[in-house]
Amino acid sequence: MKKYTISAEMAMAQIAIENSLQHTRIQKKLAAYNYDRKKVLEGKSLLQEVQMLQSVKQDKYGKQFETADALKSQTQEVKSLYRKHVRSARLAFEKQRGIMEQLQLSGRRKGDVMGLLEQIYAFYSKIEMFTEEMGKYNVGGEELTQAKAMVEAIYAIRQQQMQSKGDAQDATQKRDEKRRALQAWVAQFKRVARVALHDEPQLLEVLGIMVPSARV
């Protein structure tokens, strides 16, 4: 069985539904098989729900991608500042082992994003006590405060990202449920239409239902 994209499915359903509602002869023949105007309007309502949920789903994923881009940009900026400040802090406290450990200045930086962000935030939370010493190495107190605020903003963006991801998944699930219902409705509609219009294949084509060529 050929698979169609959701856009193609919606387009084909719209052709079948709208043309059946606008064509008097098709309406009459379908009504004889329990597919009167009210029944077809039920399919139209279902199609509109799928269209609406598809739009919502696209908006949610768009928000998720937008948040991801903002997070990447902000994280790169913070990492650049952090590397600069770590270099200055190592110079300022190279002979003070306790402070070096407190600021996590020894060893490698953490590789995973969340681990590194925690390390960065811990650094800026504690370096506030040493603004005078850092000032001697070209790092002002305002710069350190700004860097800490940027890290806090990243945490807020990550929270938004997780929320956007959950919203996008929820929207997709709701859309898929209605999509399956629409697929079932359209399949049944086509079965009925093929019977109701079997003697007028040109009307089937009006509904977008392909009619196989007669075999010779």
Image: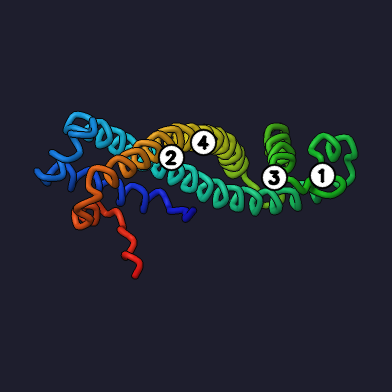
Residue that carries the numbered disc 3 in the rendered image:
113
Nearer the observer: mark 3 or 1; the answer is 3
Residue that carries the numbered disc 1 in the rendered image:
105
Residue that carries the numbered disc 2 in the rendered image:
60
Quarter of the image where one finds residue 183: top left
Nearer the observer: mark 2 or 4; the answer is 4
Q: Amino acid at mark 2?
A: Lys
Question: Residue drawn at (29%, 53%), measured in percent from left and top?
Answer: 209
Question: Residue drawn at (33%, 47%), measured in percent from left and top?
Answer: 10
| Farthest front residue in view | 216
On screen, residue 214 versus residue 141, left or right, reads: left
| Separation (CA) of disc 2 from disc 4 | 9 Å
On screen, residue 17 versus residue 212, left or right, reads: left
Image position, residue 67 (x, y; %): 49, 44
Q: Nearer the viewer, residue 72 or 177?
A: 177
Residue that carries the numbered disc 4 in the rendered image:
169
Instruction: Indicate the quadrant containing the C terminus: top left, top right, bottom left or bottom right.
Output: bottom left
Tags 2 and 1 touching, CB below 8 Å: no
Q: Which mark is residue 76?
A: none
Q: Amino acid at mark 4?
A: Gln
| Separation (CA) of disc 2 from disc 1 | 40 Å
On screen, residue 141 versus residue 212, left or right, reads: right
Q: Amino acid at mark 1?
A: Leu
Q: Mark 4 or 3 closer to N-term?
A: 3
